[in-house]
Image (spheres, coloured by chain):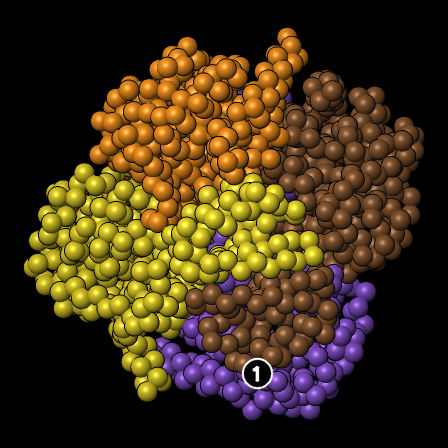
Chain colours: A purple, B brown, C yellow, D orange
Amino acid sequence: MIVILKENPDRRQLEFLTGWLQKQQIGIHISEGAHQTVLGLVGDATRLDIDMLKQMEIVEDVKRVQEPFKKANRKFHPLDTVIQVGSARIGGGGVSIIAGPCSVESPEQIALVARGIKDAGADLLRGGAFKPRSSPYSFQGLRGEGIKMLVAAGREVGLPIVTEIMDLSNLDLFAEVDVIQVGARNMQNFELLKELGHSRKPILLKRGLANTYEELLMSAEYIMVSGNENILLCERGIRTFETYTRNTLDITAVPALQTLSHLPIVIDPSHAAGKASFVPALTMAAVAAGADALMIEVHNDPPHALSDGAQSLTIPAFAKLANQIRQLESTLVEEKN
Amino acid sequence: MIVILKENPDRRQLEFLTGWLQKQQIGIHISEGAHQTVLGLVGDATRLDIDMLKQMEIVEDVKRVQEPFKKANRKFHPLDTVIQVGSARIGGGGVSIIAGPCSVESPEQIALVARGIKDAGADLLRGGAFKPRSSPYSFQGLRGEGIKMLVAAGREVGLPIVTEIMDLSNLDLFAEVDVIQVGARNMQNFELLKELGHSRKPILLKRGLANTYEELLMSAEYIMVSGNENILLCERGIRTFETYTRNTLDITAVPALQTLSHLPIVIDPSHAAGKASFVPALTMAAVAAGADALMIEVHNDPPHALSDGAQSLTIPAFAKLANQIRQLESTLVEEKN
Amino acid sequence: MIVILKENPDRRQLEFLTGWLQKQQIGIHISEGAHQTVLGLVGDATRLDIDMLKQMEIVEDVKRVQEPFKKANRKFHPLDTVIQVGSARIGGGGVSIIAGPCSVESPEQIALVARGIKDAGADLLRGGAFKPRSSPYSFQGLRGEGIKMLVAAGREVGLPIVTEIMDLSNLDLFAEVDVIQVGARNMQNFELLKELGHSRKPILLKRGLANTYEELLMSAEYIMVSGNENILLCERGIRTFETYTRNTLDITAVPALQTLSHLPIVIDPSHAAGKASFVPALTMAAVAAGADALMIEVHNDPPHALSDGAQSLTIPAFAKLANQIRQLESTLVEEKN
Amino acid sequence: MIVILKENPDRRQLEFLTGWLQKQQIGIHISEGAHQTVLGLVGDATRLDIDMLKQMEIVEDVKRVQEPFKKANRKFHPLDTVIQVGSARIGGGGVSIIAGPCSVESPEQIALVARGIKDAGADLLRGGAFKPRSSPYSFQGLRGEGIKMLVAAGREVGLPIVTEIMDLSNLDLFAEVDVIQVGARNMQNFELLKELGHSRKPILLKRGLANTYEELLMSAEYIMVSGNENILLCERGIRTFETYTRNTLDITAVPALQTLSHLPIVIDPSHAAGKASFVPALTMAAVAAGADALMIEVHNDPPHALSDGAQSLTIPAFAKLANQIRQLESTLVEEKN
């Protein structure tokens, strides 16, 4: 860490600062410039409170040299983390496919989709039971009943299930869930993250709409320091000025997060685009960029064929795409060899 | 609400759509353009699921004509909401001042600040006990103990208190709190909002860093539909590309939210700027723009005078600013008369 | 176009408005809602001044139903535009590769890179002679001399060249340039765009860092209405809150712009990432998403091996990537057949 | 400047780097951390090419300690710059008012507005002759004829005039213009900035919609290094996710730019809000925050009273606001004394 001092720092305050640092086992290199004095801190600065430092009267600015996350940091864990869920292995090469509807609507609907995606080669089944909706007047999900329907559908076809938790008070309902999802709006719900750190279940942590890679990894760190290191990082589109699509998929998250961290990266092209017609192109891009897993919305075709889901693929469209994913995956593996 | 259909919509699907709308008591005006057919919906479209509509195969786009929020909407409640907390009245003219430290640190510290701001003319005391920090390695607040210290300090000087809740599981600890704050990161924690709707206490709802006015008002609506209409909307800076300041204060939120809603508007210049030296200018701007209340960070000067708080004012600096606020307030009142 | 009127519009003003519209051959459908009257405009509303409409006292809001761009719009030109430059064909299937250094530095340097990329299979040579730099103290490019060096190097190896214009006053220097680039900072330099509309040369138009697809297409429209329809749209990264990469590649621009427009789409992964190590992953993603062309920075290895270019590939690294691009391209073609 | 090296840097490259720095008169302090070596550079690093440094293979990151702008920097010019235009003095205390229509439409219109704002106490007259419009189908301004009308109107009432230049090729038309405006879209049109540096006229430089304070000041620096130090910095709203207003006024620009620079700060509340009804609140906020000047759109009321300008004030509304500005100004002066 680099601490830049204001011009002509008060000597007494400087002594206080250096004493405070030394008590925390931090070594100091002083470098005096024409207009500015700079302190280079040597030692484990991760636990230093950067805000506290910035608040000191003689400090002009503090700049990090090392990332503030440790357990999620690839520098200290060079090997890829591989997460095993049922028969699926996510991370360490190859692409896993998570698929299913945005919301669980009925036992029949979720059973139909589960069968369809299983036959098309998906590895995990997703479905929402608790739905974070920006309007209180919109459908809020089937909640506990929805989870039961999802568990039953997953067990029937032999796929592990992923579903979102919205509040700690519902944690008991997730006993039979295989992967617990934390949604983008809850990425910095720190009380929830801490509690999930005491679980042994893998956590699929979605990046917030306006959050950085570092903030995402700090949220993963919250879970990891409590003991649970089975985390899937998920990029699902960020908010930009473009309104033609629902959000904007940040495809660079794939190589960037794989460089910064050892945790597997999941791409959700459906929420990012908000338009089913763009999902195949974004999916193929994610596979080509090296994503560890995909999370794709698939919806059964309702009797009246009225809704094809603004961002959901039909089961046949998903089956076609899953086939293309597998072909692209094998081409990329060949190229590497 | 306006529904724009794709070119040459399927007749059977169009009949399904119009039937579905009529069942919900929605009248329809059809307008056929050169390339596009447009449906104008007449009636209470607030409860229509706009996502459901957008997903329909024959629909190209849906545009709202009316705001999706109702209870927070000034159109249906022309008069300003006034919130009474202890002897303070927020809303309906005049500026209330909420002040105090970012974190409650000890009984002595909070008592000292409470006395200082009371003497300077503040109307409410704030202080954080549960602190949402992006790093798990940073100070997380004194939690339940912090609330007790804050309550004691407030009672001692006769000021109502404001403090932040981070999770529903802690709600019991807030029994003696006067105003419950929902932080920016929790603005769309809908389970929390719904539960606070069953409280009778005023809620200070902070706008998320990348959220729109409409999203803020929809979050207020979540609380209001559950029965609690005592809401203070708080603008505390949004995330922009500027990194010189911590966030960017959106001063237009004052006239904009006052136009859209009848709820009082609080401006927090301290979190927005992140630099104490900019707080006076932003505070005066907020008063001149017509804010109903201010929320200003004030910290006692610690023994070693080492920290003046990157964004906190000292007690004397706050006293000077409070005086300027009162002078500006009376000038503006005179001008109106 | 939809015009939403304020409640209880003044009758005389409404007559003025409808008369004004009718004079412009616009038909009107009136739809009266519970709280709002809505006018649906029928006819060619492209030339209507939407700002003028919004300014009218009785108008609350105006919403477009159709895109404001016409010549760039796929609805009116369903077939892909194919741009022929020398022996290269961009658009209509297949991926063209544009490569070369950020700046032309010397005749030897550009000749070396030109030979290297030609041997690796590139289709066009790029190189900057006029450099838009945010600091006046940074290297500003070799200007006219740089263009001469680039032209010579391109002719020597038989590759068409692409280089950026920064101001109309330099247009004469571009006589032998094959494709004229308009940089992101000039995307809304409308005087420049109009003048380039009188050229017959293809224009590579880069999207501004904070501009939408519609704004990019409106800038293309500026060139096209002046008579030049040979436009390459280029996505080169947008500004987001992420600072780990230079910009954020918007990969969705590929399917989105291909849906909205018939013009070919170029992806520049080098400027987007700002880090050479991420360029291969982003390049493969762009090809998989269906981009028509790529624009990749390649730099010769200087004698002291000191600089490998923060975002530039070495010639061998480019050759390896070009090979992977071609393999991926043929796999994708096979899948389609 | 701080240069952070990669782990285990190549010794030969490190010698090359330190030799290269020493040749440029830069002293070096080396600080070896547990995982990282950091170089502290001492001397005038303004002219160092930061991109060149970042590209070096052994460099992980480069962090500035000092601002990259020099002539615009308050550190080296502690006193406020005061710009004299006709009888108006902008900067150094007090608020100047620039007012006028968005576009010059006819000699009668501009004469009418000029008289109205002069009587209300404005200090300068603004009016657009070259209009940057996102659509080629919108009104593009009266160009040279418009400037003549504006000059005549200004001379008639005795007010200096401000108008926007869009391209260097039109510079001759600005001979009688008092202040030349560079619009937000041209803030990084560096060829234009360099040429305006050779002018003696004051330049009103608008901040781009997605640009930072530092980028604005670097653009001012472009003009200043060419010799023209009469620059007015103008904040006119930035692009954010909020779409209810046209842009978002960044009020913090006032204290922030006044801290960073000695140049006067102009606030344009009209373009920021895009809604006339919000202009008074934003104007008062700007005055209270300490802005040096305001730029307000004022339009004559057209015969049919159809258009009051979405963001333009009528002449009587402006007169009322100008009066409030003057009252607030004198209150603030009193408080300071």
In the rendered image, residue D91, in percent from the top left (x then y), is placed at 47, 17
Quarter of the image for residue B270 reads top right
**Residue found 53% across the figure and 28% down from its top:** D314
- Foreground residue among A189 and A319: A319
Q: Secondary structure at mark 1?
A: helix
- Identify which residue is drawn at 26% across, 44% down: C192
In the image, residue D112 above or below residue B84? above
Residue under the point 72% across and 47% down: B75
Please, is residue D45 above or below residue B81 in the view?
Answer: above
Badge 1: chain ID? B
State the residue lying farthest toward the top: D337
| Residue B198 percent location from the top left of the image | 87, 55
Amino acid type shown at disc 1: Arg
Residue C259 visible from this viewpoint: yes
| Percent position of residue C60, x then y | 58, 47
Q: Is residue C34 left or right of residue A96?
A: right
Quadrant location of the C terminus of chain A? bottom left
Q: D184 or A37: which is nearer to us?
A: D184
For disc 1, the marked residue is B12
Closest to the observer: B250 or A292?
B250
Quarter holding residue B176: top right
Quadrant of the rendered structure where residue B42 is? Answer: bottom right
**Is the residue B183 above or below the residue C139 in the image?**
below
